[in-house]
Image (cartoon, helix red, strand yellow):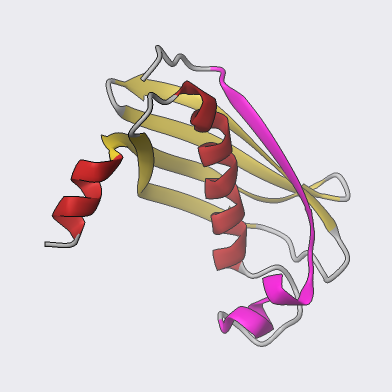
């Protein structure tokens, strides 16, 4: 792992599609961006931020999340997710994230990830 420091950022822009909705995912019965999908997108943005900074054979895994889903984003809405690395404690990394839809904060939270050796992690997980 190269040296990581707070301030590393990433951004992801999506258009909410039927496959992203609470109705489709099963987390509710309304056609808006599902909370689990919002979290998955935020995690995707953290992975995207880290990818160029990890050594060959390393990956990161999610270990802890906190999420506030504050506003509904309907099908067709453009949601921008931004993440920022705020804490580095060895291999433990903490990101904050914010999702905006039409300038309104639709969600925010924190994601903790741990940098691990991919092969060792998979081996232990499949025992």
Is residue 107 rendered to the left or right of residue 59? Answer: right
Is residue 69 rendered to the left or right of residue 12? Answer: left
Image quarter of residue 125: bottom left
Range covered by the magenta-colored residues: 7-26
In this rendering, the answer to whether 110 lies above or below 50 is: below
At 24% across and 52% down in the image, what residue appears? 122
Q: Name the quarter where the C terminus is drawn.
A: bottom left
- Measured as percent of width and height from the top left, residue 29 is found at 66, 87
Is residue 72 rendered to the left or right of residue 45? Answer: right
Q: Residue furthest bottom?
A: 29
Q: Name the quarter where the N terminus is drawn.
A: top left
Image quarter of residue 56: top left
- Measured as percent of width and height from the top left, residue 114 is found at 32, 36
Give yes or no for residue 123 being in the magenta stretch. no
At 14% across and 53% down in the image, what residue appears? 124
- Measured as percent of width and height from the top left, residue 115 is found at 32, 33
Give yes or no for residue 12 being in the magenta stretch. yes
At 86% across and 61% down in the image, what residue appears? 77
């Amino acid at each position: 792992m190269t040296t990581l420091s707070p301030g590393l950022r990433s951004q992801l822009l999506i258009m909410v599609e039927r496959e992203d909705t609470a109705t489709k995912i099963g987390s509710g019965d309304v056609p808006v961006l599902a909370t689990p999908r919002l979290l998955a997108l935020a995690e995707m943005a953290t992975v995207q931020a880290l990818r160029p900074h990890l050594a060959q054979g390393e990956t990161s895994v999610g270990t802890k999340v906190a999420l506030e889903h504050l506003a509904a984003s309907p099908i067709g809405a453009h949601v921008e997710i931004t993440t920022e690395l705020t804490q580095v404690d060895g291999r433990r990394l903490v990101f904050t994230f914010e999702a905006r839809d039409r300038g309104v904060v639709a969600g925010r939270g924190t994601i903790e990830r741990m940098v691990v050796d991919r092969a060792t992690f998979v081996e232990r997980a499949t025992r």
